Amino acid sequence: MNETRGRDESSSIGQETSAVLQGLGSRAHRKRQTSSGTVWSVAAGTMLLAMTALPAPAMAGFTCGGTVGPGGTAVMATDINQCASNPVLTIVGPVTVDMAGHHVECRDFVANAGIRIIGQGAVVKNGFVYPGCEHQIVLDGSGHHEVHDMAGHQAGNLLSGTPIASILVLSDYNVVRNSLAALSSNDGIRVGGHHNVIKENYVVINARDGVRVVGTSNTIKDNIVTLSGADAFNLTPGADANTVSGNYAISNNGVGFRTVTNGSWFSGNSSVGNASGFIFAAGDDGVTGGGNRIQGNNAIYNQGPVSGEVIGGGFLIREKDDIVNGNRAIFNAFWNDLAGIHVMKPGSEHVIAGNTSLFHGATDLTDETAGCGTDHWSNNVFLLRNQACIH
């Protein structure tokens, strides 16, 4: 009997122990769930507090003489008016700045820059720089910046000694696109750096050149330049190995495309209604140069003359060893003796082939070297030529 009672008590104790253990396990499970929920609640609350504590995009820099960047994205919420600081606004890359339709404005040409972009890799977009600055937008620093959908107009006064421009590109590997450069007292866009891309811009009513290129290995593409006081596109001595394509020069007082450059490529450009179409003059002033590729361009109704210069015509070549292929020259300077394609440099070795030149003054095609020298003319369409060696 005692043994039976012992077995019964042992069984009873085992059952009670199992029940207790199950209860403890259940409570432990509920506690883990509760603890987990508490931890996540605390974590979520901490994150929310941290998020509310984070600063908004850098707005404080959008003040007269302020600096925005480096780092992050900043959206401009107010204009900066009549600022005498130089520059009015400094942007330090890397940063993305959306001006959201707002503007900055210099006062009385005290500042030589409205917006100065330094550092590396800044993006600046959707804004205006109003009159009163020597330069509206300056791309400086280590380059690799992008400026798009911006407008700079009415640059003026020469305070710093740096040639005036609405958009001044001093550094390398930048992109300037879909922007307006207008009403400068000097150049619209001036490119002093190298390996930049200047594309799809509107350059209007500037007192000197529309786009002036000083640096090398730049791409000037799909821009429209009109009503410049001098040339639409001007590549200066030493501005070599540039690519100029798909641009329009319309109704400028000077030359549509003037270049004193070596080893550059001009393709698909159009000069319409300017004083002269294209002038390639790397052989002027004792400079030996040329070797440019001139392909698929149009010179139409360029009637000259440019003030102080006896020029006109469609394509005037005063350098050596160019390839002139697939271009069209129609009705340029009908009143003077310059041809649609006019080669003036003796001792050159040009290839002039597959061009169309019609309705000019004395001739459509001219080579001033007797017997064409070492120039090669072939498969051109024309009405009048000055020598039988032109084909």
Image (tube, helix red, strand yellow):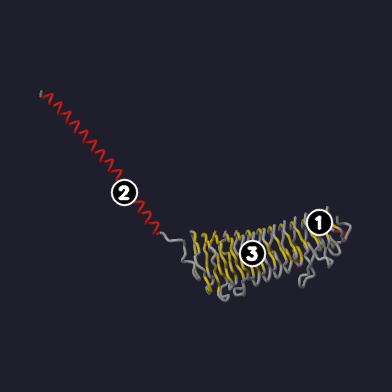
Mark 3 and mark 1 lie on one chain; the one further toward the N terminus is: 3
Amino acid of disc 3: Val
Mark 2 residue type: Thr
Query: Residue 178: horizontal and vertical position, in percent?
Result: 62, 60
Residue 126's place in the image compared with 87, above or below, is above
Residue marked by disc 1: 356
Front-lying residue, 317 or 287: 317
Q: CA distance from mark 3 to mark 1?
A: 32 Å
Say which residue label 3 marks.
191
Residue 102 vertical position relative to residue 44 in the rendered view, above or below:
below
Secondary structure under the numbered disc 3 in the rendered image: strand
In the orientation shown, which residue stands out farthest toward the right? 388
Task: Give the mark nearest the N terminus, 2 or 1.
Answer: 2
Q: Which mark is residue 38?
A: 2
Instruction: Judge the density around disc 3: few (<14), some (14-19), many (≥20) Cα neighbours within 10 Å.
Output: many
Give the side of residue 323 with respect to residue 130, left or right. Answer: right
Residue placed most toward the observer, 275 or 323 = 275
Disc with the residue nearer the chain's start (2 vs 3) = 2
Report how far apart the C-alphas of labels 2 and 3 lie in the structure: 61 Å
Question: Three-letter amino acid code at disc 1?
Answer: Thr
Asked whether the viewer can see residue 317, the reply is: no
Outermost residue, left direction? 2
Residue 55 position, x and y percent, is 42, 61
Count of marks placed on residues: 3
Q: Is residue 182 left or right of residue 47?
A: right
Residue 238 in picture, x, y percent from top left: 69, 63
Q: Residue at x 29, y 45 (%)?
A: 34
Disc 1 crowd, CA 10 A, few/some/many (<14, 14-19, 20+):
many
